[in-house]
Image (spheres, rainbow, N blue to C red):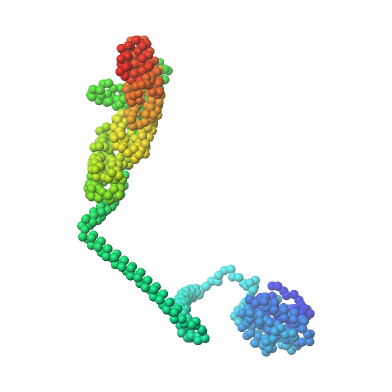
Amino acid sequence: MAHRPKRTFRQRRAHSSDSDGAEEPSAEAGAPGEPAAPGPEEKGRLSDGVGPEIAGGSHQARGPRGRGRGRGLVWASSRRAARATPGEDVSSGVQESRTVDHSTDEEDGTGDSLGSKDDQSPSSDSSSSLEEKEFPPVVEIPDAAFILAARRKRELARAQGDYISLDVQHDSTTPDLKKKNSDEDPESEPDDHEKRIPFTPKPQTLRQRMAKETASRNEGTSEESQEDENQDTWEQQQMKKAVKITEGRDMDLSHSRESGAVKKFDTSMSFPPVNLEVIKKQLNARLTLLQDTHRAHQREYEKYLQDVKSSKNTIQNLENSSSHALNYKFYKSMKTYVENLIGCLNEKIIQIQELESSMHALLLKQAVTLTKRRQDELKQESAYLQQLSRKAETSTNGSFEVDEKTQCMLEEMESRRTKRRQARALSGNDDHQEGLSSEDELSSTETLDFQKRHDEIVEDQKKVFEDVHDDFCNIQNVLSKFRQWREEFPDSYCEAFIGLCIPKLLNPLIRVQLLDWNPLKLNSIGLKEMPWFTSVEEFMGSSVEEARKDDDSDKKILSSIINKTIIPRLTDFIEFIWDPSSASQTTSLVTHCRVILEEHSTYENEVSTSKQDLLKSIASRMKKAIEDDVFIPLYPKSAVENKTSPHAKFQERQFWSALKLFQNILLWNGLLPDDTLQELGLGKLLNRYLVTALLNATPGPELVTKCSRVAACLPEKWFGNSALRTSIPQLENFIQFLLQSAHKLSTGEFRNEVKEIILTLAKIKALNQAESLIEEYHLDHLKSVIKEV
């Protein structure tokens, strides 16, 4: 609790008694409404003549919000009091300060309570009179009797215990008095630092908790009802506003009308003199304008009548003409048919694509299995022979143990070769070399699984259009609809470009028929024997005479179908399924490609893109086969002298296998460019593998036979220019090898083989080299043969 510093009488006169009285409650009051304990300082104040009424009045006038402002104004009035005449009464100064406090608290909203307190003071009359004046210049000092009365009143308050003493212990009546005083004076609240803070909630009884819960529910209900009332009030106010705005507008309109009606003609205005000629001219001009407008409207009316009449005549003519009605009926039916056809195909195309994917995956799996097995067997057998050679060189007894996996693989390979030999013997084909046959046999289990899955896809193929009418799934019926259009309305048929639309419409139907078509099988059906091919050819044949000369879209239907449907399917077979080492697959594929690329490539500009893609895929697949599948090992002569040794047999099989691939590559003569074939067949395969193997072979009849088989594979058109007596540059290594073999064989008993070599040179147009051999070995009887060539 802070103590107030002592003041002398001189200090009190300088700062006014009112300022001390205004600061007393906030500095010493321990609680609201309790007077401070007396001390030496308080006695001095009482002796100076400041009564309890004045102190109490200043305390009540100062509210929680107006303390600072009240002090400022009190301070200003005290300074005026200091400059006043010293002979005036002290009470007038007190009254003046109280009046200033009144005005200050009224500005802060506490004037009502202050006024009620001031009415109870003895000097209320003087304060009411001073309110009409502003800052009186005279300060009245209270007399001795007033001071004595104030002192007695203070002593009486001390005797009643209406204060908190600094030296005396608090009695039990003090809280009650505090509560009473706080109820009587709501503005005399304690400061924040004087309040007692409860740290634990006060325990409540059951009745208090129930009363509190009931009060909260009542408050929620009252709040909801209050919100409803506020909502209703707000709606009523808005309605009143809208009504007032409407009424205001009506009043404005009525006022404007009344003002217009009330407006009177001003007689003071002057008009120009009336001229009858001017009026007559204006009326004539107006009449002329109206007559022109009338004539324009009349002409427009007559035009409308003529249009109506012509429209009626047209309608009547159309109604009377039966051909137009039939035409409309046909076009409408054709439109409906095409829409239904397109909807049907859009619905079925997804199922067709799924079946194509399933068939492609089945064939791809089989092709990958065979290719991987052949490559694995080649690696295993080559590794086995290399180990056998090393063991034979290091061991004396020559015994060699083979692991179980390699032994099973060798036995399986030998069993397949034995079956092929027996089949050739039964067919009478004894002139066959091992390595020329394709090892595409599958096990019984794999064959059964493949056939089962293939049959399932074929059954699903038959169910694609089982719920569709023949007019929408039969190619011949579809084309008959368009044939009727072309015959009856050729102009509209050509203007609609139906010849360009037919290949797109027939694409799904043709793909269903091609689902089971495998161009890699020798017994596969040709394109010309397919039903769709026959139907399209008939449709094109009937359009040759009927179509206009400047329209040839129908003539391109077949080539467009081949370009957009057949060639993409062939390209997929070549890139993923075709095995270039297989003679049967290559022969069948070349046959189908010749039919497609040569016989039906009338319009080169249309099929050039797809054709080039097809040829590129063929060349890339053969190049990959040369890099992955060709392998001709070179063994010492001691290992291959015995023709029955494993090394000699393996080397022989690999040579004939490479020669078979060489023959398959050259089958594409006429389809692939000559440069591509010569690069693949002669550059990469003949000179790199076959000639190298021939150089390490033993001279003899077998070597000459191999050379003759190589020359037989070469296309004759490469040597068609009889004026040249030299062969193509890519065969130079092969020609040199033939000359070396002829020299080696001429020294022994193989003169007939030299004759075969000369004939081989003549076949490949190496005439200069053949003549040199004839002259060297005196084989004059062969000159006639060379001349015939």
Figure disc tally: 0
Residue 446 visible to an observer of this rendering: no
Identified at 46% across, 79% down, the residue is: 249
Identified at 45% across, 77% down, the residue is: 235
x%, y% of residue 537? 25, 40
- Position of residue 250 in the picture relative to residue 119 (left or right): left
Front residue of this view, candidates 71 and 630: 630
Quarter of the image for the N terminus: give it.
bottom right
Q: Quadrant of residue 525?
A: top left
Front residue of this view, candidates 63 and 146: 63
Vertically, is 703 above or below 494? above
x%, y% of residue 601? 31, 37
- Position of residue 24 in the picture relative to residue 436 (left or right): right
Q: Quadrant of residue 72?
A: bottom right
Identified at 26% across, 36% down, the residue is: 526
x%, y% of residue 204? 52, 73
Q: Residue furthest front?
A: 277
Identified at 46% across, 81% down, the residue is: 275
Vertically, is 224 above or below 439? below
x%, y% of residue 29? 67, 77
Front residue of this view, candidates 681 and 308: 308
Residue 771 visible to an observer of this rendering: yes
Quarter of the image for the C terminus: give it.
top left
Front residue of this view, candidates 689 and 653: 689
Vertically, is 459 above or below 397? below
